[in-house]
Amino acid sequence: MPVDETRTLSPEPRAAREHRTAAVRSPDGKPHRSVWLLRLMVVGLVLAALNLRPAITSLGPLLEEVRKGLGMSGAVAGLVTSVPSLCFAVFGIMAPRLARRFGPATIVCAGMTAIAIGLFLRPYAGGTAGFLAASALALVGIAVSNILLPAIVKQWFPDRVSTMTGLYSMALAIGTSLAALSTVPMTKALGGSWQTGLAVWGILAALALCVWLPLAVRHGRDRTRPAAGTKPQPRTPGAEAVESAAEAPVPAPALPMVRSRTAWALACFFGLQATAAYITMGWMPQIFRDAGLSAGTSGMLLALTMAMGIPLAFVIPRVATRLPSQGPVVLVLGLCGLSGYAGLYLAPASGAWAWALLLGVSNCAFPLALTMIGLRAKSHQGVVKLSAFAQSVGYLISIPGPLLIGVLHDATGGWGLPIALMAGLMLPQMAAGVLAGRNRTIEIELAT
């Protein structure tokens, strides 16, 4: 056969064969993703995920010291715990447009820069307003990274979405629990200043920046020149027009999220689980401290809650992708949350470790929501739009929760009514999750 004769007479050079083996074609067909680049992206995903929560969970164990140091009321402290949701809602919606213009890697790199600067500055910015402004800067970086990581996974690892989602969700849980567990002892070891205890987490973001910077540079290089190893081809009439069209950015698919029932259900589920998560991260240590436990023990309990996401964030996405509907997983997590709130209401101190564990299982609705974002869209462009819509609307929904908890606590002088509100919000979360978990995609839903 002619093909066989060609292979026999003109064997492929070894260097070319090795280059072909190392290269991995992206969805747009450009062979620029070598094995080392994919490995670097895996490291980058892990480091980025490690930085998505320490800005928040490092504050909870030291909230009492921060309130005293800055003269915050309970309502203002509730505003501080609501700032993450506000930033995620406002700036997360900008992520898809920025990613189309500059590339996802460049935007995540900028996000890591904002996190590092914000965390280094906020303890020393001076007063509550400066603290909030520097916190907002860090949270803007977290917001855009939150939106883009699921899309990066879909684009770079389309055949390993559940595995990679589980990996970076697990890293996110590690960063969350690590900050909650080590902030208080690290603060004491560094001299007892809450400013130092909060600022030190900027180092982790700076480390992530060291990995994302070469990824961003490489991405920018790939956007402006052909892949390495390609040779100029003979020009034919109209070739320049064809090349210009091929190199032009791929337009975002026409997917009006506001018309999708699945997108709205997913946004509501995401928002309600975010409400529970930020109330837990911001207020649970204070609930345990007011029940008579020490600051160190309260931090350890929050760390346990967050640490439950380490194994479960890897298991839940794999289980969820094997089910035709994710509704049963939603219900199990919701029942764990209701049980944890009931225990927190009835015996916050005596059963503290059990309640922390149950609430930790319930908080794994976050990796489940990320997994459902990947499952409810067919293309990575669709995932970007769905992720931006679900997370931005969801975080907008979650803004009042932590603030309302602080106001209710100030008004009643106790935690009974705030905990009852937390439990009440779990019911619509379960309902929205069941609807979002149905086996369908937004592309098909919007086409009908």
Image (cartoon, helix red, strand yellow):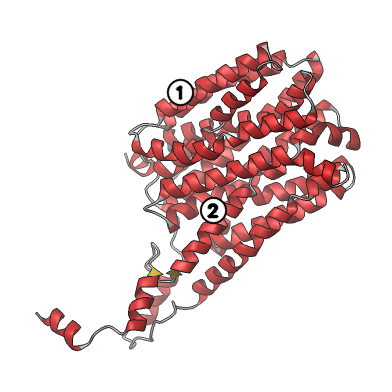
Distance in Å between CA atoms under marks 2 and 1: 31 Å
Residue 419, how many percent across, how many down?
67, 18
Amino acid type at circle 2 is Pro
Badge 2 is on which residue?
96
Q: Is residue 301 left or right of residue 190?
A: left
Quadrant (top left/top right/bottom left/bottom right) for the C terminus: top left
Residue 40, how many percent across, how many down?
53, 63
The label shown at residue 331 is: 1
**Dot in front, 2 or 1:** 1
Say if 43 sits above or below 230 in the image. above
At horizontal 70% and vertical 18% (from top left) the residue drawn is 418
Towards the viewer: 65 or 222: 65
**Counting residues from the N terminus, which is met first, the one under dot 2 or under dot 1?**
2
Quadrant (top left/top right/bottom left/bottom right) for the N terminus: bottom left
Would you identify the image quadrant in which residue 294 lies?
Answer: top right
Amino acid type at circle 1 is Leu
Say if 282 sits above or below 410 in the image. below
Say if 177 sits above or below 351 in the image. below
Residue 351, how many percent across, how many down?
65, 17
Would you identify the image quadrant in which residue 423 lies?
Answer: top right
At horizontal 46% and vertical 24% (from top left) the residue drawn is 332
Q: Is residue 257 left or right of residue 117?
A: left
Q: Crowdedness of circle 2 by 10 Å Cα count: few (<14), some, many (20+)? A: many
Residue 213, how many percent across, how many down?
62, 66
